[in-house]
Amino acid sequence: MRLWSRELWRLAGLALAGLVIGWLASAPGLGLSAGLAVSLAYHLRQLRALHQWLTHRSQAEPPAASGLWGELFDRLYKYQKAQRLTQERLRATLKRIQESSEAMSDSVVMLDRRGDLEWWNSAAEGMLGLKAAHDRGQHITNLLRDPRFIDYFEARDYREPLTLPAPIDERRVLQFQITLYGDDERLLMARDITRLHRLEQMRRDFVANVSHELRTPLTVLAGYLETYLDHADQMPPRLARGLGQMQEQTTRMQNLVNDLLLLSRLEIDQRLEENTPVAVGSMLETIRRDAESLSGGRHEFAIEIEEDRQLLGSEQELRSAISNLVFNAVRYAGDESRIVLRWRPWGNTACLEIEDDGQGIDPVHIPRLTERFYRVDKGRSAATGGTGLGLAIVKHVLLRHDARLEVESHPGEGALFRCVFPVERVADAAHGDQAQRA
Ligand code: ADP
C-alpha cells in the first residue's frame, strides 16, 4: 500500500512540476502533458525491461528498479526461483523412479488414461517386445493382442493377476498385473513366472501320476479282500475282523485316489467352456436320493426350488460339487438334523444353497475350509470317511463355473454353504431349451 501511494505521489509530483514549469512559460496545459509523458515513458521503459527479462533472460537476475517496479521484479524472481526448485526436485524424483524401475527384472509399463504407452523399462522390451522408436503413443492392445489380455484390460477389474504365454516367446509364461493410479492412468507390470509354472505343473503331474499308478494295486487289493470277506464265516473271528478293517482302509484310499485324480483334472484348465443347461431341480433330487441312502434315515431332507432358471455348465462337475456339500452335511451336522437343498434367486443372478441345522463350524476355520486336507476336527473327519479334499473340489468346480463359495456358520447354529453363480451362467428356461435343442 505504501508503494502504491509513493507511486501516486511520484505521478502527482511530475504532473505538478510540469504544470508549474508550463505556467512559468505561459503554457500550463503543455507543461502538465509533458509531466505526464515523462511518467508514462518511465513506466513503458520498465515494462520493456520486464518483457525482455521474461522472454530472453529468464535465468538471469531481474532488471534493477526501485519502487513498485522493483517490488514486482523481486516477487516475480522469487516465484520463478521457487518454481525452478520444485521442478528440479520433481525431475530428480522421476529420474530416481525411472532408474529403479530400469533396474527391475520385471516389466514396468506406464499407460495414459486412454491406454497408450507413455514409458517402459528395458525389461519390457525384452519380455513384451516393445520398441522405443515406434511404440511410444501406441495403444497397449495393439501390441499385446491376446484376446484374454484385451478382455482383462478392458474389464478394469484388476484384483487378480492374469497369467499368459509371453507374446514374443510362447514357451515363457508371464503374469500380468495392472494398477490404476493418478488421473485414471495405468501401471502394467509383467513378471516371468515360467519356473514357478513349471514347478506347479510338475507337482500336478506327479500327484496325478502317483494317483493313477495307485489305482490298479488298490483295485486288486479291494477285489481280493471282497472275495475273502465273502467267506468270512469260515474264518476265525480275529482274522475276519482284520480283513474287515483292511477293506475299510482300502476303500478310504480308493476314495482319496479318486478325489486326487478329480482335483488334478479340474486344475488343468481353470475355466470351463462347457455350457450345457442343467435342470437343477432334477439334479438336486438325484443328490437327495444318494444322500438319503448315506444317511440311513438319520436326517431329514428338503428341496426348495424358488428359481425357475437353469444353470449353464457341466452337470457332472456340478453334481460332484453339490454332492460333496450335501454328504458333508450328512457326515458333520449330526443325527436328527434337517438338511435343505435350495436353488433360489440371488440379486439378478441365482445361487445354490446347502443348509443344515447341525453342530456348525467355528468362524475361525471358515477361511481355510477349502484348503486341501484342512479339517476342523481331524479325528471326527477320519472317522466319517472324509478325504479332506471335498471342499477343495467344490472350490475348483465353482472356479471353473466363474462362481464363488460363501460359508455362514457358527458353533451350534448349523452351517450354510452358498454357491453364487454369475448371471452369464444362469439362463431362463426358454434359453435352456433352445441350447439343448442346438
Ligand atoms: P472332509 O473330507 O474332511 O469332509 P472337506 O473338505 O469336505 O473334507 O471338509 C472340510 C472340513 O469342513 C471337514 O473336516 C468338516 O470339519 C468341516 N465341514 C464341512 N461341512 C460341514 C458341515 N456341514 N457342518 C460342519 N462341519 C463341516
Image (cartoon, rainbow, N blue to C red):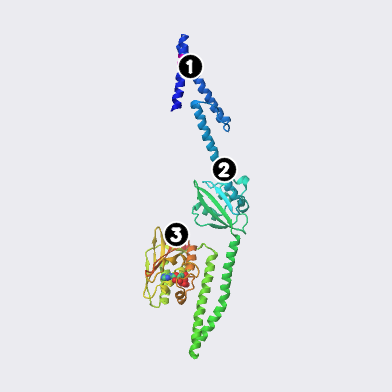
Task: Give 298 or 64, whichever is nearer the viewer.
Answer: 64
Point out the image quarter for the N terminus: top left
Which residue is depicted at the point 55% across and 55% down? 176
Q: Is residue 428 above or below residue 262?
A: above
Badge 2: residue crowd in 10 Å (few <14, some 14–19, many ≥20): few
Q: Are marks 1 and 3 in contact (CB under 8 Å)?
A: no
- Along the horizontal axis of the image, is 123 left or right of 115? right
Image coords of residue 47 (percent x, y): 52, 25
Image coords of residue 48 (percent x, y): 54, 25
Image coords of residue 133 (percent x, y): 63, 45
Per the image, label 2 sits on a secondary structure element best described as helix
Q: Earlier in the sequence, mark 2 or mark 3?
A: 2
Ligand 1 contact, mark 1 (Cβ < 8 Å):
no
Amino acid at the residue labelled 2: Arg
Amino acid at the residue labelled 1: Gly
Mark 2, residue position: 91
Q: Quadrant of residue 286?
A: bottom left
Q: Quadrant of residue 202?
A: bottom right
Label 1, label 2: how many angstroms apart (C-alpha)? 51 Å
Mark 1, residue position: 35
Answer with the quadrant where ligand 1 appears in the image: bottom left
Residue 262 located within the stretch drawn in magenta: no
Q: Is residue 383 above or below residue 18?
A: below
- The magenta stretch is 14-19
Which residue is depicted at the point 55% across and 39% down? 85
Asked whether residue 6 is in view, the answer is yes
Mark 3, residue position: 422
- Along the horizontal axis of the image, is 161 left or right of 431? right
Task: Give 230 or 28, whichever is nearer the viewer.
Answer: 28
